[in-house]
Amino acid sequence: MARTQDVGGAHSGVPCRRCTGGAPHALGCRVVQAVAGGFHSVVLTACGNVRTCGHNAYGQLGHGDTTQRQWFTPVRALRDARVRAVATGEDHCATVSDDGRVHVWGRGDWGQLGLADSRSHWKPMALPDVTLQAPAGSAWSTPVDI
């Protein structure tokens, strides 16, 4: 069993060695949120690392392709985002960073990503002109309905 690392609270946002290195299938850091879409899953670690696995026909895993993954794989496009919350839809995902930025990706053919188009996006895209303000307190982890 892999050891976990507490890095200073629920969501410190400080990258830890276990999340940034090691075996690609090892979570390493403590998971603070786990959500599931139609056929994919997303976990958020204590240091703000986002990892996804599962079905990926619409790019809902956020890796820039449509390759299915059997193990949790880091979403590299979010490695500097300091993510605080993750959410999923049937075939899409969203995150909120500590600076309030919202990133979305996956199936978008009905405009569900809010990116003013009707297409899927295989990598996280920041919602233009959208910023959420964190509630009072230093650490927040409330899932956000988008």
Image (tube, rainbow, N blue to C red):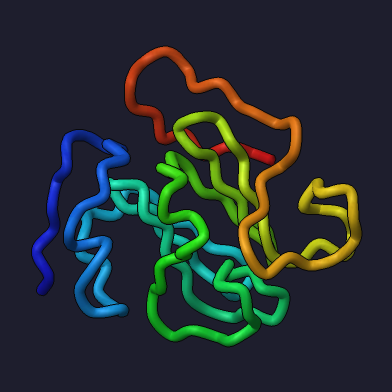
Say which quadrant the N terminus sits in: bottom left
Of all residues, the one furthest to the top in this rendering is: 136
Say which quadrant the C terminus sits in: top right
The residue lying toward the viewer, choosing from 79 and 134, is 79
Q: Is residue 78 above or below residue 52?
A: above
Q: Residue at x 67, y 69 (%)?
A: 122
Q: Residue at x 59, y 86 (%)?
A: 67
Q: Residue at x 30, y 78 (%)?
A: 24
Q: Is residue 82 above or below residue 16?
A: above
Coordinates of residue 25 in the picture (x, y in percent): 30, 79
State which quadrant residue 62 falls in: bottom right
Left or right of 45, for residue 117:
right
Q: Residue at x 70, y 81 (%)?
A: 57
Left or right of 53, for residue 3:
left
Coordinates of residue 83 in the picture (x, y in percent): 44, 44
Q: Is residue 95 above or below residue 90?
A: above
Coordinates of residue 124 in the picture (x, y in percent): 62, 57
Coordinates of residue 139 in the picture (x, y in percent): 33, 27
Number of marks in picture:
0
Left or right of 106, for residue 101:
left
